[in-house]
Image (tube, rainbow, N blue to C red):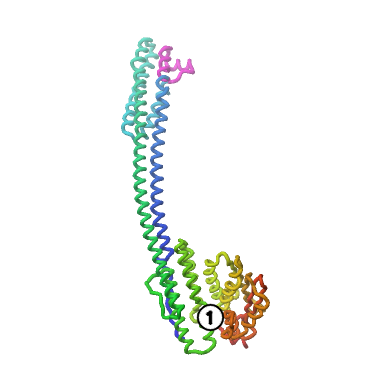
Amino acid sequence: MERTRRTQKTPGKHGIRKRLTGLLLLIGVPLTAMSVYLLIALHSYAGAYDEIVSNLTVAGSYNLDFRNELDESIYKLVVRGLPMEEALEDDSTMADPYAQIDELRHDFKRLEGITTDSQSRQWLGSLLRNINTLKERLDDIKDSLAKGGSYQENLDMLDNNIYILTELIQDDIQYYIYYQTRSIEGLKEGLNAAVRDMMIFSCILLAALIIAVLAWGARIVRSITRPLEELVQVTSRIARGDFEARAADKGGKDEIAALSDSVNDMARHLDIMVRQIKEDERRMRWQELRLLQEQINPHFLYNTLDTIVWLIEGGKYDDAEDMIMSLSTFFKLVLSRGREIITVREEEQHILSYLQIQRYRYSDLLSYEIAIDPSLYPYGIPKMTLQPLVENALYHGIKHRRSLGRLIITGEMEDGNQMCFKVKDDGVGMSGEELRKLQEEVQKPSSQTESGYGMANVSERIRMNYGKPYGLSIDSVQGKGTVVTVRLPALEAGKPGEEALS
């Protein structure tokens, strides 16, 4: 039998996930950059504001009481007429004018180092010069007191030098406060201008982002929905028997391109199988064709692709991508490269991909569990042995339950050389008469069955491959569910079935 092989495409740099990631980056990077800029700008303005307020606090503390306190301290020295050291020792409550001047110089020298406004710095320079002059005039009074100078002479120096200088220093402080206050106003104007500019820039950026996101989003949606619509048309032609139908190869490397390749491979293999079956009248080949056509049920394809389109239109791109990959895996496992016997692991993947697809359609009806012993994975099983049973349990058991049902697929080794698989559902089950009729149908050749074709086909293929001791059995209780048990010999994948018959 001729087979055509094609290299399966894997999603590359233009995959759906990568395109969606690019869309998120298009939104996130500019907004993040704008937020960082705003935070830095606000931090800068807040720092400048705090610096000015701190400067004003220091200057304001001297503006209130410094002149009066210093004038009073020096006046008391002059009135007492004693040398300064003796006067300070004699009256512990008297403030040391030198300490007051040094503290004043220290604080405003520090302000000079951190003040940036030029006019404020100009008045700070004047203030520091007046402080130096004040200290010199205080030295004159100190020397006069030490030499026993006259009271009137000391009083004249106090009036004509000290009081004038302390007044000038207070004026310098007030001017410094004034210009620092003006700096706050300038800072406020700068902040308002920056906020205004940022609002304009933000509006422009947001408008550009909206346009870019709409354009890019529309492009992504078109790149997904158009190929899917073409696939729907191709699968419709395949469903009508046109196995020459092919999805156009547009050179893409995304998930939809992989799905298109899988559909094309499916159609190609179907075409080959149909031609072969027309030439080969052996019953086994006829059964395989029937079963393969059952598995690629056009309604299943329509519903699956419609669900994918619905997910994309609803913005659930990750779910759509997962469903596309599950459908691609499902088709690949259906084909199995023409092999009749596959591994238990592959059959499990086939079941899993099928249930993952159906989960999106029957999320409120279906829950499932697959518990196959991993030690069975290397052994062989006729392809599509368990999946039709799972499908039958879903459509004829759980679906008619009209509420959440559970499907359990198990597999384990019995007696060391026999595999036992069970497909259990808690669906509507069957009456005794219905169960008896189904058991009779399953024992007939699949071409003669009136119902239960999938089960009959599975049962007949097992008997033809491994002999009558193997096959399937059915147990059911109406209203409680159904259990289908499949027993197969534990043979490594690839070994002929005749070994089981010997």
Could one spot residue 380 in this view of the protein? no
Mark 1 lies on a secondary structure that is helix
Q: Nearer the viewer, residue 313 or 109?
A: 313
Could one spot residue 42 in this view of the protein? yes
Residue at the disc numbered 1: 291
Q: Which residues are magenta?
A: 69-96
Coordinates of residue 405 in the picture (x, y in percent): 61, 67
Q: Nearer the viewer, residue 435 or 290?
A: 435
Q: Is residue 161 above or below residue 472?
A: above
Query: Which residue does the image show at 64% across and 73% down from the upper left?
Result: 429
Coordinates of residue 202 in the picture (x, y in percent): 37, 48
- Is residue 92 magenta-colored? yes
Q: Is residue 54 above or below residue 497?
A: above
Coordinates of residue 362 in the picture (x, y in percent): 55, 67
Coordinates of residue 203 in the picture (x, y in percent): 36, 49
Q: Is residue 305 above or below residue 162?
A: below
**Magenta span dominant secondary structure:** helix
Residue 173 is drawn in which quadrant? top left
Query: Which residue does the image show at 56% across and 81% down from the upper left?
Result: 382
Q: Please, what is the three-letter code of the amino acid marked with disc 1? A: Leu
